[in-house]
Amino acid sequence: MAISYKPLWKLLIDQNMKKKDLIALSGISQSSVSKMGRGENVNTDILNRICIALHCGIADIMEVIPEGNEEPFSTPERSK
């Protein structure tokens, strides 16, 4: 399985933010953003900081993609 941070990059675009804005707002390092840009694993603390800074959930910033497939796992609809 692979991790994709495409939802995060889309969220930044929607909020008219740049990666450097995310770094300043969340307090994460440039190296963490670079790792995410390459689809590498990052510490859950980094993901938590991003979610807090952007007021969103983990599914809003990342998705799991099964091996041999380009489609992410779908998350079940949550009842509100």
Image (tube, helix red, strand yellow):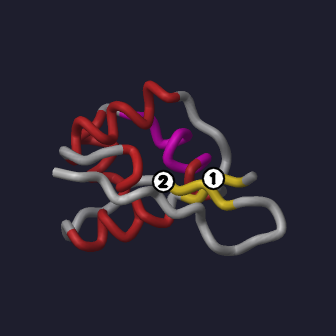
Question: For this view, does 27 lie left or right of residue 72?
Answer: left
Magenta span dominant secondary structure: helix
Residue at (22% x, 40% y) in the render: 53
Toward the right, the furthest residue is: 68
| Residue 51 screen position, x and y as percent | 30, 41
| Residue 2 screen position, x and y as percent | 71, 54
| Residue 52 screen position, x and y as percent | 24, 36
Q: Secondary structure at mark 2?
A: loop
Residue at (57% x, 57% y) in the render: 37
Q: Which amino acid type corresponds to the residue marked 2 in the rendered image?
A: Met
In the rendered image, which residue does mark 1 sit on? Answer: 3
Span of residues in magenta = 28-35
Q: Which amino acid type corresponds to the residue marked 1 in the rendered image?
A: Ile
In the rendered image, which residue does mark 2 sit on? Answer: 62
User: Label 2 neighbourhood size at 10 Å, few (<14), some (14-19), many (20+)?
Assistant: some
Vertical arrangement, residue 44 with respect to residue 75, above or below = above
Q: Quadrant of residue 68?
A: bottom right
Question: For this view, does 77 lie left or right of residue 74?
Answer: left
| Chain-order first, disc 2 or disc 1 | 1
Q: Are marks 2 and 1 in contact (CB under 8 Å)?
A: yes
Question: For this view, does 45 lie left or right of residue 51?
Answer: right
Toward the front, the furthest residue is: 79
- The reply to whether the magenta stretch includes residue 31 is yes
Depth check: give the residue in front, 24 or 15.
15
Vertical arrangement, residue 5 with respect to residue 49, above or below = below
| Residue 42 screen position, x and y as percent | 58, 36
Q: Secondary structure at mark 1?
A: strand
